[in-house]
Image (spheres, grey):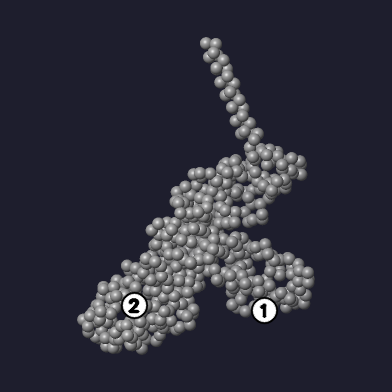
């Protein structure tokens, strides 16, 4: 009995010590307490307490400001260690919006690793610091973004016209110069969101007419219409997220929407990407991914070699540079939509979701880059991928010189049933008539080849279809398949193709071939294949019509 008393006393004392140690660890040894202890304000040392930001409208509760004190409401003047510094100037006040709505992480945590999401099984880790603007995609859906080439060209023109002499854009420009030029004009970093005066050029021109000193006399002058359009394009993309806009422009230049859907727009061949940036890393297979177990690393490696990371993937190797791969990863991480109340929806997202505005620019080059380049190549000259049929060259001069605009538009609108070419005019996430017309116009403008004049009727061939069947089996089936199902060459047994193609197009293609492809011209003699007479070519066309 005496021993049990001593044992109970010892165990109780040990328990008391453990509880005291735990209390000390919880209330005295926390890292945020040590950080706050270094902070100073105008009134003296910063009160050491657990801080948090609560925004019921956004559904966030963040304790990040327990360490990043200068981002807390009313404490912007706190100084001390670097972690106490204020946030760099941004559109949204962290004291109101908190941190996790943009950066990710675990808002209710008070330990660094937990708060940053660097722990097993936390589904929303922080975004990489060099891709922090991807967090803008949580709420925003920036509209009318052009492709990468157009965006880069518009920036170059903006700089060539010396607009930075007076205006600050994305932390550049808008400063006085040693020679007396320059001035601190309005900051244009957000005009794509807030809007800008459509008559800015006329107003500037009138102002400069009465000025003789710098910068009006030295940095501003008449601007051509194409350059003014480019400046307008550049200004429309200034939404205080320059890195994200560049990443989105790259996405719109690599044909990803040809297979993937984003916010209800795009193809149906691949997975829907609308919220892929919110994917739980714990549900991702990192077996073939070097480096850390993060979505950024997974996507970087996936864009380098899709089949190596995701077994059985139909996504081709795109042959991108590391900078392009990084930008695509950046954009994919931005696809992390948050459900918001109507009063909290940003204007750009309202324009996209409620009013049907497109997130891509309406020009043919951007639409082709976003929807078509993944299969047909950035130059439109086709693409070959291991294990897949070759994708045709839609920019081939022989092709464009033989087809009407209606043929191309019908092909885009109705697709190729049974093939990977979708019916862009019919599927839910497809293209509008004016967008299809823009693609056709782009192909014509880019190639410089006008549509042919149709001197003959659409159907004029009258020949022996049985002889054509024999010739097709002997000469054509090796590439096009014994029933025209396709192989090395495209599928010819296709209703949309045969309805759209004129007899003249088929006769000319068989007779003269198509340069840059495996299709030879059968009117030209060759030691490795038979030559066909015009009547034999017409017989083959007559046979194709039986399908």
Residue 344 in the image: x percent, y percent? 55, 53
Instruction: Sort mark 1 into few (<14), some (14-19) or many (20+) by Cα contacts within 10 Å.
Output: few
Marks 1 and 2, the one that precedes in the sequence: 1
Q: Can you say whether 445 is above or below 191 in the image?
A: below
Query: Decide: marks 1, 2 in contact (CB < 8 A)?
Result: no
Pointer 2 residue = 500
Front-most of residues 224 and 70: 70
Instruction: Sort mark 2 into few (<14), some (14-19) or many (20+) by Cα contacts within 10 Å.
Output: some
Q: Which mark is residue 417?
A: none
Residue shown at 52% from the left, 11% from the top: 1
Q: Which mark is residue 222?
A: 1
Q: Is residue 426 visible?
A: no
For residue 111, which quarter of the picture? top right
Q: Is residue 527 left or right of residue 394?
A: left
* Label 2 SS: helix
Q: Residue furthest front?
A: 527
Front-most of residues 279 and 293: 293
Residue 170 in the image: x percent, y percent? 65, 63
Residue 164 in the image: x percent, y percent? 68, 69
């Amino acid at each position: 009995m005496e021993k049990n008393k001593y044992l109970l006393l010892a165990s109780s004392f040990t328990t008391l010590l453990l509880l005291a140690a735990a209390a000390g660890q919880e209330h005295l040894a926390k890292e945020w307490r040590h950080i706050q202890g270094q902070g100073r304000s105008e009134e003296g040392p910063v009160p050491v307490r657990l801080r948090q930001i609560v925004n019921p409208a956004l559904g966030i509760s963040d304790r990040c400001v327990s360490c990043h004190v200068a981002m807390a409401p009313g404490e912007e003047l706190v100084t001390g260690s670097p972690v106490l510094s204020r946030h760099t100037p941004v559109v949204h006040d962290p004291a109101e919006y908190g941190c996790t709505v943009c950066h990710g992480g675990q808002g209710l945590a008070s330990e660094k690793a937990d708060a940053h999401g660097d722990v097993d099984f936390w589904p929303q880790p922080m975004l990489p610091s060099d891709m922090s603007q991807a967090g803008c995609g949580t709420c925003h859906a920036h509209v009318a973004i052009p492709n990468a080439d157009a965006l880069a060209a518009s920036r170059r023109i903006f700089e060539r016209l010396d607009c930075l002499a007076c205006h600050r854009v994305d932390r550049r420009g808008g400063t006085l110069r040693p020679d007396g030029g320059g001035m601190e004009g309005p900051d244009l970093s957000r005009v794509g969101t807030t809007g800008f005066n459509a008559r800015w050029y006329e107003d500037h021109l009138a102002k400069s007419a009465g000025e003789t000193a710098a910068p009006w006399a030295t940095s501003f002058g008449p601007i051509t219409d194409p350059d003014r359009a480019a400046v307008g394009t550049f200004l429309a993309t200034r939404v205080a997220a320059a890195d994200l806009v560049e990443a989105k422009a790259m996405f719109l230049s690599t044909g990803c929407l040809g297979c993937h859907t984003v916010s209800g727009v795009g193809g149906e061949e691949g997975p829907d990407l609308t919220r892929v940036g919110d994917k739980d890393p714990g549900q991702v297979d990192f077996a073939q991914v070097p480096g850390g177990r993060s979505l950024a690393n997974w996507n970087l490696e996936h864009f380098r070699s899709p089949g190596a990371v995701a077994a059985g993937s139909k996504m081709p190797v795109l042959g991108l540079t590391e900078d392009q791969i990084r930008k695509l990863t950046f954009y994919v991480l931005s696809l992390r939509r948050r459900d918001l109340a109507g009063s909290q929806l940003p204007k750009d997202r309202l324009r996209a979701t409620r009013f049907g505005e497109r997130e891509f620019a309406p020009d043919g080059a951007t639409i082709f880059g976003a929807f078509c380049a993944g299969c047909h190549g950035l130059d439109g000259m086709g693409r070959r991928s291991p294990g897949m049929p070759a994708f045709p060259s839609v920019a081939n001069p022989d092709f464009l010189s033989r087809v009407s605009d209606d043929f191309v538009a019908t092909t885009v609108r109705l697709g190729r049933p049974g093939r990977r070419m979708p019916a862009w005019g019919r599927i839910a996430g497809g293209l509008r008539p004016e967008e299809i017309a823009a693609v056709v116009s782009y192909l014509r403008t880019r190639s410089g080849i006008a549509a042919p004049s149709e001197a003959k009727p659409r159907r004029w061939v009258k020949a022996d279809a049985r002889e054509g069947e024999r010739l097709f089996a002997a000469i054509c089936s090796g590439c096009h398949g014994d029933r025209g199902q396709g192989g090395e060459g495209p599928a010819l047994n296709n209703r949309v193709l045969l309805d759209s193609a004129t007899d003249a197009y088929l006769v000319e293609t068989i007779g003269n071939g198509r340069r840059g492809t495996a299709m030879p011209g059968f009117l030209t003699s060759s030691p490795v294949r038979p030559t066909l007479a015009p009547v034999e070519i017409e017989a083959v066309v007559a046979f194709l019509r039986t399908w």
